Amino acid sequence: MAEAGCARSAADTLKTLVVVPTYNERENVEPLCDAILRQGSALEVLVVDDNSPDGTGELVQELSAREPRVHLLRREGKLGLGTAHIAGFRWALARDYERVVTMDADFSHPPDRIPALLESSLRNDVVIGSRYVPGGGHEHWPLRRVLLSGLSNLVARLALRLEPADCTGAFRCFRRSVLEQIALDNIRATGYSFQEEMLWHCSGRGFCIAEVPIVFADRERGRSKISWREVWGGVATVLRLTFAPRGAKHRAPEV
Ligand SMILES: Nc1nc2c(ncn2[C@@H]2O[C@H](COP(=O)(O)OP(=O)(O)OP(=O)(O)O)[C@@H](O)[C@H]2O)c(=O)[nH]1
Ligand SMILES: [Mg+2]
């Protein structure tokens, strides 16, 4: 029988921090924060800005003065996407958030899928917004990006024995307990390959990982920050983890 009455969504009940790393995202950051906050009353945003020369940080500072659900964490320079995520995790763990969602600032990750990630997180420890499950995909992506993403995922799945179909995307939801148990200090990838390394730790610890479909859109405003340096960083991360012991050794320190 269908459920009757008023049901509140997970995005209205689970206190959630959406971590958005930014570097030169002035054109995207304000509409993105608005779009995120519209998805549920329990959502807040933390922008982790690396002193963007285009003034993204100043813009978010003004925004946070008007909107108490928007927060800014400023770092002194471009320290990498992976360390920005870790800084966001630590910021959330120092407060009482139940879930942490991570996403890019350029609207590639559709904000209207945040509620689906959170609903799935009621049953799963880690939820990935996935391009590579039925219903998912990407729009307007140049062939070289399709190939790079496909190859990176294949390598991650084969070499690191990761099960998710999308191991490289940054649109994810973590239960607080996951972030408390992963030894964040042990994560060495500072750039884009942080995504594979984080998943490797989650999988090694036996967390339940699910995927919900998303359609990834190519950025319309601002410029890409991906570089060959990130590609080689990814190769180095995969090689390092392929020969690293998995699981128990990566337990978080006892507190
Ligand atoms: N704080 C911080 N954010 C970063 C850094 N590098 C990239 N970002 C952000 O990370 C997200 C992903 O970067 P993108 O340039 O969109 O990378 P991408 O999605 O692989 O590339 P495109 O598909 O071309 O957009 C964006 O929100 C960037 O602003 C960094 O060093 N520090
Ligand atoms: Mg992007």
Image (cartoon, rainbow, N blue to C red):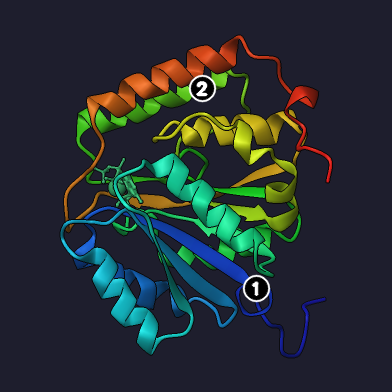
Residue picked out by circle 2: 156
In the rendered view, would you say 59 is above or below 166? below
Residue 135 seen: no
Q: Would you say 190 lies left or right of 219 here?
A: right
- Foreground of the two, 150 or 77: 77
| Three-letter code for the amino acid on which mark 1 is drawn | Lys
Q: Would you say 3 lies left or right of 11 here?
A: right
- CA gap, disc 1 to disc 2? 32 Å
Q: Quadrant of residue 78?
A: top left
Label 2 neighbour load within 10 Å: few <14, some 14-19, many 20+: many
Extreme top residue here? 243
The x and y percentages for residue 79 are 35, 42
Observer-side mark, 1 or 2, equals 1
- Foreground of the two, 135 or 199: 199
Q: Secondary structure at mark 2?
A: helix
Q: Earlier in the sequence, mark 1 or mark 2?
A: 1
Residue at (71% x, 89% y) in the render: 6
In the rendered view, would you say 160 is above or below 129? above
Residue at (44% x, 31% y) in the render: 193
Q: Quadrant of residue 175?
A: bottom right
| Three-letter code for the amino acid on which mark 2 is drawn | Ala
Residue picked out by circle 1: 15
The x and y percentages for residue 34 are 36, 78
The x and y percentages for residue 166 are 50, 36
**Quadrant for the N terminus in the image:** bottom right
Q: Secondary structure at mark 1?
A: loop
